[in-house]
Image (cartoon, rainbow, N blue to C red):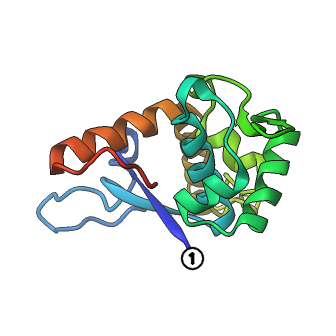
Amino acid sequence: MICTLIFRIKFIKFFKPLSIFPRLEEDGGESLLSGLTIKMKLTTRGHYSVKALLDLSLQPKYGPASVKAIASRQEIPAAYLEKLLIEMRHAGLVHSLRGSIGGYKLARHPQQISIGEILEAVGENIANLAVKVSPSTQAEDWVTFTLWQRLNQKLREALYSITLADLYYDARSRQAAVGEEASFVV
């Protein structure tokens, strides 16, 4: 299962005059880079990790929730979820509590936990776009290399600017707009 995030990037006019980017139309249409859509695919690891932490953010007073309860609500295999939560505990995103009222809880408020932190905690590759080739001496290759470096930086900034609280409010807004009930499965 792969979840896809789509980012629309509006390129500044800096790129338009460059002749190496073809035009959509002969009569002065926009550069092909305008409105470029970049897809970042999340693996099941990343998707389940975000779902689990969003579920924890919904707990009253951010209290603990058991792995079994989270797994049941979010339809995630419990054994797999436990491994992800251990990785996120090592990264300082969650605390584990023992005992009858134990489980996992957020280590910080949802406004202080970014999607980028969650993804990196479970080993997701945030720099998802190809930039491994070093720039050559040809202008087209150098421009392409620089473009991908900038896109990776923008993607990273976007993922680190979106918090669990943002996702919560976005989901609640969507539910209100379509008239769904308050039950919440990510």
Work out which residue is located at the far front of the displayed protein and give it.
Answer: 100
User: Which residue is located at x 55 percent, y 51 percent?
Assistant: 147
Say if residue 128 shows up in the picture.
Answer: no
Relative side of 178 to 186, left or right: left
Mark 1 residue type: Met
Relative side of 52 to 163, left or right: right
Q: Quick check: 96 above or below 51?
A: above
Q: Quick check: 110 above or below 185?
A: above
Say if residue 107 shows up in the picture.
Answer: yes
- Location of residue 108 by image quarter: top right
Percent from the top left, x then y, of residue 80?
76, 66
Q: Nearer the viewer, residue 52 or 167?
A: 52
Percent from the top left, x then y, of residue 126?
67, 52
Relative side of 103 to 157, left or right: right
Work out which residue is located at the far left of the displayed protein and give it.
Answer: 27
Q: Residues within 10 Å of mark 1 (few under 14, many from 20)?
A: few
Q: Please name the residue that numbered disc 1 is placed on.
A: 1
What SS does tag 1 mark? loop
Percent from the top left, x then y, of residue 158?
52, 39
Relative side of 60 to 45, left or right: left
Work out which residue is located at the far bottom of the displayed protein and give it.
Answer: 1
User: Which residue is located at x 62 percent, y 66 percent?
Assistant: 76
Percent from the top left, x then y, of residue 143?
56, 53
User: Which residue is located at x 54 percent, y 48 percent?
Assistant: 151
Q: Nearer the viewer, residue 40 or 77?
A: 77
